[in-house]
Amino acid sequence: MSNDHQAVYPAAELFLLKQFMKREGIAASQALPGSGLTLAQLNSAESPVSMDQFDRLYRNLYRLAGRADFGLALGSALSLSRWGLTATALLSSKTLGDALATADRMKALLRSRFSLSVTLEQDEYRVQVERLQGMSYALNAAYAHEIMLASLQQQIRQLLGRDFRFSSIDVNYPAPAHAREYERVFACPIRFDQPQTTFCIHRELMHAPLPLANPVVKQQAMAAAQAELRRVSIAHRGDILLRVRSVLEQGEARMGIDEVAARLNLSARTLRRKLAAQESAFQTLQDEETLRRASLYLADPLAKVPQVALQCGFRDVASFRALFHRLTGLSPQQWRQRN
């Protein structure tokens, strides 16, 4: 399975897409065929999405909207919240330049198809946009650039807490039939068919303090974002043991194999086979996660064993005690005394 088909990305953007569909008069059920997504997933924070699923959804929306400037319209509708918890790291950055640098560092988590490089030219910064090696476009270059530029403009406005326009934009493709819409959306000089895609931002804006800057919150948010990035990286490397452990750790207590397999975009049978090839089994990983959680909860001297059993997914305390003894050779009380 290629990285594009791995359901590993946060689903926060699905809510924004649902809002966009409503404004465009598109029924959500019309946009989902072929994407592997369900109506329930549009409202679920627990459903990771693959790059391929997002692309299929984008293509369906483009077809259903029937408007040439669809990329500009969709990009303008994608607020900072599309990035989930990572948005907090951006909002709490010291300056706009700091926020953009943070976003570029986290581009693997943000599903970016582009990398950014910055040079200072007199009183403005020129940001060069390059497609990442091996990345394909959902439709074409113009569509991808329109979404990227329009959404970035909208998100910079939210970071600054005021109106924002690029000082100029160059794009490396010919002027589309709806080129006048670029003038309306961006309200800045735009040149088509240039050797490279770039946009410029005034120097003073890049160094201006952001209204929500908070170094403590930034540190906390980056810790969460980097943990999420590690999870995505693990999934991309294809280590099935690490991927299952990651899902179990983030999910509800005692998740079953069917639910875990679904989150990994696999059948339960395939998941069993992959684990067996690694000389492991789902029950082993599930028990490991239960022990991890139980150890954390039992470290609290005020926590009662029945409460810990419930937090670990057991309604029957006796079953919890039996599992804990099988895994550690100790009762929960004995483990607590020794630790």
Image (tube, rainbow, N blue to C red):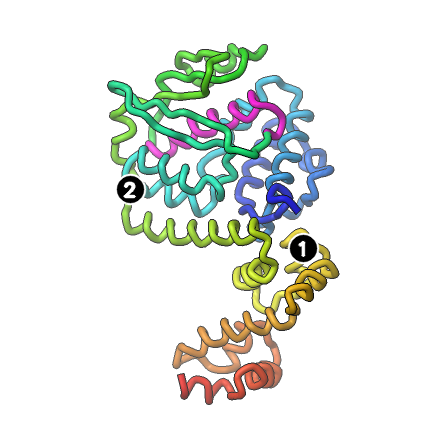
Residue 3 on the magenta segment? no
In depth, the one of 191 and 166 nearer the eye is 191
Q: Quadrant of residue 177?
A: top right
State the image coordinates of residue 162 (x, y, percent, origin top left).
34, 28
The local secondary structure at tag 2 comes to loop
State the image coordinates of residue 64 (x, y, percent, origin top left).
68, 26
Cα separation, mark 2 vs mark 1, equals 38 Å
State the image coordinates of residue 294 (x, y, percent, origin top left).
50, 75
Quarter in which the C terminus is drawn: bottom left
The local secondary structure at tag 1 comes to helix
Q: Report the residue at 44% width, 37% height from top.
A: 80
Q: Give amino acid for label 2.
A: Ala
Q: Give amino acid for label 1.
A: Ala
Which sits earlier in the primary sequence, circle 2 or circle 1?
A: 2
Q: Which residues are magenta?
A: 137-160
In depth, the one of 69 and 234 nearer the eye is 234
How many C-alpha atoms fall within 10 Å of the one at disc 2: few (<14), some, or many (≥20)?
A: many
In depth, the one of 296 and 288 nearer the eye is 288
Can see residue 339? yes
Q: Report the residue at 47% width, 53% height from top.
A: 230
Q: How many marks?
A: 2
Q: Which residue is mark 2?
A: 213
Prevalent SS, magenta region = helix
How many C-alpha atoms fall within 10 Å of the one at disc 1: few (<14), some, or many (≥20)?
A: some
Q: Which residue is mark 1?
A: 262
Relative to residue 287, is residue 91 depicted above or below? above
Q: Report the residue at 59% width, 74% height from top.
A: 287
Relative to residue 339, is residue 61 depicted above or below? above
Can see residue 251? no
Q: Report the residue at 54% width, 37% height from top.
A: 16
